[in-house]
Image: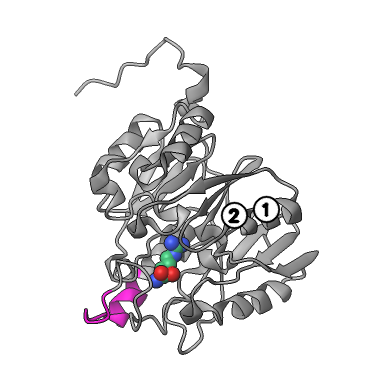
Amino acid sequence: STTTPVSLSSEPAELGDPAERRPAPRRFLMCRPDHFDVTYAINPWMDIGAPVDRARAVSQWEALCAVYRRHGHQVDLIDGVPGLPDMVFAANGGLVIGDRALSARFATPERAAEGPAYHAWMAGRGLGRVLAAAEFNEGEGDFAVAGDRILAGAGFRSTRSAHREVERYFGRQVVSLDLVDPRFYHLDTALMVLGDTIAYYPAAFSDDSVRLLARLYPDAVLASADDAEVLGLNGVCDGYHVFLSDRAVRLAGQLRERGYHPVGVDLSELLKSGGGVKCCTLEWHGYPRG
Ligand code: ARG
C-alpha cells in the first residue's frame, strides 16, 4: 500500500487542525461496581427482571480503568456503598472545576444517598470549597464542561434552577438544553465534548435546543440513531483519544475522520443500567495531578 497523501489545503478554521490534536493528562474519579445491580428501574434501560453479572461488570469496569491509566490519565477511586447499586456512575456524583466542587442532589429517591457519599469524598480532598447542591443536580451526567462554558441538560433529572445554581457557583456561562427522549435522560447520554467541538444526537433534544447547538457548534459531529442507542455518545475525550463504546462503530469512524483516535471499550453489563464510559467517569477539570 502507498502512504496516505498529505493534504496541502488547510482545513476550515472552525474545524481545528486534526493533525494538532494532542492528548492531555486528565484526572478522573471512578467507583468500582462492587455493589452494582439493577434492583429498581429509573430509566428505560433498566429491566429489574434481567440478570446482571456483577463479576463481569467489575472486569469490564477494571478494563476501562486500566485503559485510562495506560493512556496516562490518573484515576482516583471512591468506595462503593452497599445498597447503592448505581454508585458506579461516578459522573453523577457532582461537578469539580479547579478548586471548587458541587456535590450532587439526586432527583430519584433510589439514588439520593449517593449525594452525601460523593460529598464526603470531595470534602476530604482539600479543595477550596465543596458545596452540596440545593437544586436537583446529577453532576456531570447533566453538566458538560466545554471550554469556558458549561452545557447543561434538563428535562429528566437536573433542573433549570440547578443550571442557574451551577452558573452562580462556578461563575461560568451555563447553556441550558432540553432533553426530550427518556432513553437519553442525562445530557451525557446524548452529547459528548470533543475539546473544541462536540458530538451529539439531535433527536434527543428539543427543536429549540437543536437550533442552539447548531449555532454554537456548526462543525459538531452528528451521531446516528444506531450509535446513540448503544450510548456511543457517552464517551470521554482527552483531546485526542476518545474512549467510547466499542459498539458505536460508525461514530468511531466519524471521529477518526476528524483526527481523533477512538478507543473502544465494552461496558455491556453497565449498559443494563443505562450507563456507559462517561457515566463511570467524573473528571476533575483543571485540577492538578497528585
Ligand atoms: N441507572 C443510572 C440512573 O438511571 C444510570 C446513570 C448513568 N449515568 C450517567 N451519567 N448517564 O441514574
Task: Say which element carries label 1.
Answer: helix
Q: Position of residue 186 (x, y in %)?
A: 45, 58
Q: Which mark is residue 164?
A: 1
What residue is drawn where x is 66% and y is 60%?
A: 96
The residues colored magenta run 47-60
Indicate whether 33 appears above or below 89: below
Question: How would you rate the neighbour count of disc 1 (Cα within 10 Å): few for under 14, some for 14-19, many for 20 or more?
Answer: some
Amino acid type of the residue tagged 2 in the rendering? Arg
Instruction: Check mark 1 vs ligand 1: CB closer than 8 Å? yes or no.
Output: no
Q: Report the residue that reaches farthest toward the right.
A: 128
Indicate whether 153 appears above or below 84: above
Q: Report the residue that reaches farthest toward the bottom.
A: 82
**For residue 120, what is the image quadrant?**
bottom right
Indicate whether 251 appears above or below 267: above
Q: Tell how many labels.
A: 2
- The residue lying toward the viewer, choosing from 201 and 67, is 201
What residue is drawn where x is 51% and y is 68%?
A: 90
User: In 3D space, how far apart are the residues under numbered discs 2 and 1 (Cα atoms)?
Assistant: 7 Å
Disc 2 designates what residue? 160
Amino acid type of the residue tagged 1 in the rendering? Arg
What residue is drawn where x is 36% and y is 16%?
A: 6
Seen in the image, is 54 located left or right of residue 34? left
Q: Position of residue 10 (x, y in %)?
A: 46, 13
What residue is drawn where x is 42% and y is 10%?
A: 9
Whether residue 137 is visible: yes
Seen in the image, is 115 located left or right of residue 81? right
Does residue 250 show up magenta in the picture?
Answer: no
Question: How would you rate the neighbour count of disc 2 (Cα within 10 Å): few for under 14, some for 14-19, many for 20 or more?
Answer: many
